[in-house]
């Protein structure tokens, strides 16, 4: 994730979407001191762990990262069939 300050990702909250169902993470570790990127700005490395129970191992899910105001800041497609 990229932002304008070293602690920009500190209060980010991820959810995994399966259609309309939101799956909450079991563990969140947001980068509090993001790395300075060569082109300017900062790059945060965040770790999100979700429970695998009930997930389809061939399914596609959407990872949504929201800020403290609950606004979507980033969205990723997660295709479990492409993972080992």
Image (spheres, rainbow, N blue to C red):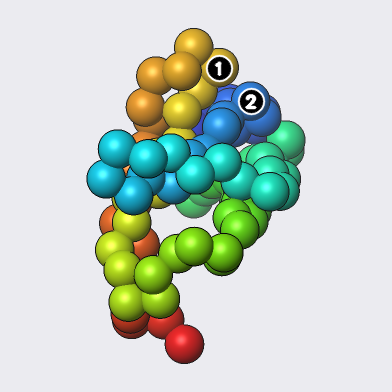
Q: State left or right for residue 42 relative to residue 77.
A: right
User: Which one is nearer the viewer's eye here, 67 or 27?
Assistant: 27
Instruction: Give the alpha-carbon distance from disc 1 to disc 2, as whole Å.
Output: 6 Å
Picture residue at 45% right of the left edge, 64% below the top: 55
Picture residue at 43% right of the left edge, 39% below the top: 22
Q: Secondary structure at mark 1?
A: loop
Q: State left or right for residue 1 relative to residue 8.
A: left
Indicate the quadrant where residue 19 lies.
Answer: top left
7 vs 68: above or below: below
Tell me the residue that label 2 is attached to: 11
User: Where residue 48 sits in the image (x, y, percent)?
Assistant: 61, 52
Q: Is residue 80 visible?
A: no
User: Which one is nearer the viewer's eye here, 58 or 64?
Assistant: 58
Q: Secondary structure at mark 2?
A: loop
User: Which one is nearer the viewer's eye here, 31 or 58?
Assistant: 58
Query: Which numbered dot is residue 29?
Result: none
Picture residue at 49% right of the left edge, 50% below the top: 38
Tell me the residue that label 1 is attached to: 68
25 vs 13: above or below: below
User: Where residue 75 sits in the image (x, y, percent)?
Assistant: 33, 43
Label 1 CA crowd tier, 10 Å (few <14, some 14–19, many 20+)? few
Q: State left or right for residue 44 relative to residue 71.
A: right
């Amino acid at each position: 994730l990229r932002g304008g300050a070293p602690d920009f990702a500190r209060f980010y909250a991820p959810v995994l979407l399966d259609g309309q169902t939101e799956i909450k993470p079991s563990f969140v570790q947001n980068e509090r001191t993001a790395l300075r990127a060569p082109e300017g700005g900062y790059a945060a490395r965040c770790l999100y762990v979700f429970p695998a129970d009930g997930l389809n191992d061939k399914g596609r899910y959407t990872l949504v990262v929201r800020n403290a105001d609950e606004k979507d800041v980033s969205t990723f497609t997660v295709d479990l069939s492409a993972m080992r």
